[in-house]
Image: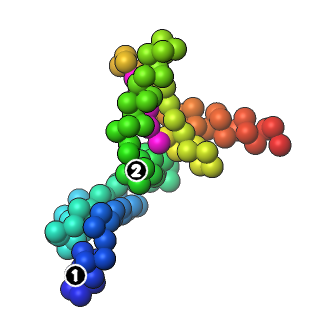
Amino acid sequence: MWYKIAVREDSCCMLISILVFLLQIFKEREEDLRRLSRPLECSCFRTSIWDETLYKAWSSIVYQLIPNVQQLEMNLRNFAEIIEADEVLLFERATFLVISHYQCKEQRDAHRFEKISNIIKQFKLSCR
């Protein structure tokens, strides 16, 4: 397990993210991956190309890579309050993955981020 020692020594705040595409084996593989990666934290995402799970997984990974995310979220909240918005989203420029968001009211559509992202991407393509 020399690689685990090297990772611990060289990386004070390493992020390990694993996307698992075979849903039927996810639970047993997730337990194995978490056990094998100890004492490091490991994030596992059950994903499929057929639904929004892949989008959510990549958004979560991008979110974890953002430094000072608490400051960013506080600024989004302040911005939303100034413009009296119910919700504010911040997308990554190239992929339109959600980096962060603020909402003051519960939203009914759990897939709204993916839908908005797809609408923006389609609009961007139509403007070329």
Q: Which residue is mark 1?
A: 5
Which residue matches tag 2?
67
121 vs 49, nearest the viewer = 121
96 vs 77, left or right, is right
Residue at image position (55%, 45%) is 92
Label 2, residues with CA under 10 Å away: few <14, some 14-19, many ≥20: few
**Mark 2 and mark 1 residues within 8 Å of each other at the beta carbon:** no
Name the residue located 17 percent from the left edge and 70 percent from the top edge: 38
Q: Main secondary structure of the magenta part?
A: strand
For the residues marked 2 and 1, what is the alpha-carbon distance in whole angstroms? Answer: 25 Å
- Residue 4's place in the image compared with 52, above or below, is below
Residue 98, image x and y in percent?
49, 40
Task: Left or right? Give the position of 91 relative to 124.
Answer: left
Tell me the quadrant of the picture where the N terminus can be found.
Answer: bottom left
> Can I make out residue 114 in this image?
no
Question: Dot 2 lies on which element?
Answer: loop
Residues in magenta, as a range: 99-103
